[in-house]
Image (cartoon, rainbow, N blue to C red):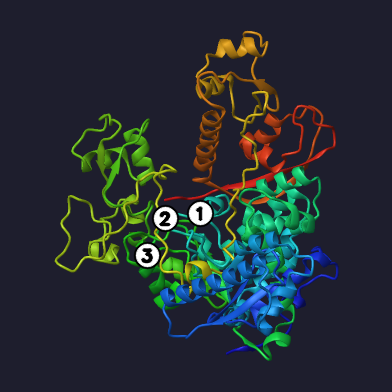
Amino acid sequence: MLAPCLHGLAAFADEADPFAHPAELEPDVRFWIRVYTEVTTDQGLIHDDWNLKLVYEVLRFDPASSPAQRERRVMEAKARYAALLRRFASGATSELTAHERRILHAFGEKATPRDYLDAIDRIRFQLGQADRFHEGLIRAAAWETHIARVLKDRGVPVEIAALPHVESSFNPAAYSKVGAAGLWQFMPSTAKRFMRVDGIVDERLDPYSATDAAANLMLYNYRLLGSWPLAVTAYNHGPGGLRRAQDELGTSDIAVIVKRYQGATFGFASRNFYVAFLAALEVDRNAEKYFGPLTRLPDTENTPVDLPDYIAVSALAKAFKVDMGALKVLNPALRPPIWSGARLVPRGYALRLPGIQPESEIAAALARLPPAQRYVAQRNDGAHRVRKGETLAAIAAASGMSVARLAAANGWNGTHAVARGDLVRIPLPASRAEGAGQAPATLAENATTPAAGISPQAPPPAAEPPAAPEPTPVHPPEPAAEKVPPPPREPVSQRQTGSAALLPAGSPTGGTDTTNYGVSDNDTVIVQAEETLGHFSDWTGIDSQTLRTLNKLHKNAQVTLGRKLKLDFSKVSAAQFTEARRDYHHHLQEAFFAAHRIAGTVNYSVKRGDSLWTIARQHGDLPLWLVTQYNPDADFNDMRLGATITLPQVVEINRQ
């Protein structure tokens, strides 16, 4: 049953508005309101990409036209207005049509030939979004209560709940052409800091998990930038780029940064992200003013259940007496290998069930699952390639079985030593029944599809096998090897052309690491967490003793966080050094977030005797680099008693 539209996000908004509405940005906001409310995806605006008040023409497409036909129309229109601007530059301004005179007057009486010629390169096309925005308003009601509650609980302005209008039109299945996904359009690299993203579970597609992640990312941006308008802009551009803008211009004024910052990657999307957000917020708050009476989808009630074991999704559907289709709708984060039966729903996953389920019924349903259908490890592809440093015991533990069972499956004795590159055959994971000494269940009892998870030693029954599952190693994959399924055709932009793309999805171009790994003009760097003199020797090709002499370091002295270090670039260039240094930190952080995620933050007051090392170790054994990322302006070599620092709350992710 559909619920009537009331007030959208206005019902949750506080009186104080944390978002600036500078007068100089108002024309840009009005441009985006027009895009969101007046111009549909069968239309678009040919406009100046800097002066958004200058709209040359509204293009209208045949709804049946192909992307190539639309692209051709756009290119023809751009060429037409480029020719007109060349006429203006040459002084040929007589015998103009009323439409052409309007454009001429928009440049003003003081316009020079150079102004007209420069404007040629700024001709841009923007696809309309009115129909999508209308659909997003209808969809948004299903999650807006949850989103508002999460934002309020985390201390994030509730107005941020309008951001998915800009990102995805509140389509949780949306994929962008650059790989961003879900309601909040997270890129994989950023998402992995806050949620699980791999070939088995992609929480970007779950509106609930993704909302938690978006709130944590916004808090991180705000912590680094000190301004909610800049935190919103950083959602698209990355906080590192915005910190550079602050330093370069000496201000946090969003209007000054939007109009004056000339960063290499601070292009149209970044410059317009905040004003597009303000426009989306205005339209959401006044939806009926722009679209008339709306009937929104109801808020979907569901109950999350933390799974105690690895269980086939078909077994869960049967135990909870839930239609598989309904289960799939409520759990979009589960990837195809789970629905095909090639993988099990992971232990610890919060499976969402329709409606409000009493705890007693949940317990009874779980009790109905026999031990033979509850597994201690993930179903795998039947083989694992040994990596450096791995032992048979470690592989067995990760597979949820004894060394003897794993060795027997490979024809070895229990003392067999494996070497890097060896292929280890993995039998079916042990069920709770096998762990208790009961006879193992038959394949028919354990597998949702005939060939799912079958060991290479056992031939599958004579039945049509499922599609070949994506191989998944026993251990959490190396960061570089982890595979995320390629995105399907983008569901929200099938009619777009290359030049007609809507404002690019929020995918931080600068990443979430704001650390400066570059080299100063005097060949010095600032030592960062997890760096040693040995690292600098490796990256420069200069032996450690030479670097010690260059920096007047005693024989046993260590380089410390925040120290300025002089380097010798006679063997490698500064650019090569920076690339190697950045790669080291990238892999360090990627490996950490392959097994952990950030669930929130806490404030900590510095006590007597505290150091960065003791604080990090006493609060979940946090990596030093992660603490410094959350406190980029703190001097950890001179911490003042009572000073407040922010500590991320980190939890482990079950990657199996």
Q: Which residue is mark 3?
A: 336
Residue type at tag 1 = Pro
Q: Secondary structure at mark 2?
A: loop
Q: Which residue is mark 1?
A: 188
Q: Is residue 420 left or right of residue 83?
A: left
Q: Secondary structure at mark 3?
A: helix
Residue type at tag 2 = Val
Residue type at tag 3 = Pro
Answer above or below: position of 177 versus 9: above
Q: Secondary structure at mark 1?
A: helix
- Contact? badges 3 and 1 (CB < 8 Å): no
State which quarter of the image contains the N terminus.
Answer: bottom right
- Which is nearer the N-term, disc 1 or disc 2? 1
Real-space Cα separation, disc 3 to disc 1, in angstroms: 18 Å
| Quarter of image, res 392 | top left
Q: Which of these two is toward me, 127 or 413?
A: 127
Q: Is residue 48 left or right of residue 106?
A: left
- Contact? badges 1 and 2 (CB < 8 Å): yes
Q: Which residue is mark 2?
A: 484
**Residue 501 appears at what percent x and percent y?**
53, 68
Image point (53%, 26%), residue name? 573
- Which is nearer the N-term, disc 2 or disc 3? 3
Q: Is residue 646 left or right of residue 299?
A: right
Q: Can see residue 82?
A: yes
**Residue 97 appears at what percent x and percent y?**
65, 83
Q: Residues within 10 Å of mark 1 (few under 14, many from 20)?
A: some
Answer above or below: position of 348 versus 360: above
**Residue 631 appears at what percent x and percent y?**
72, 40
**Residue 484 appears at what percent x and percent y?**
42, 55
Image point (76%, 58%), residue name? 228
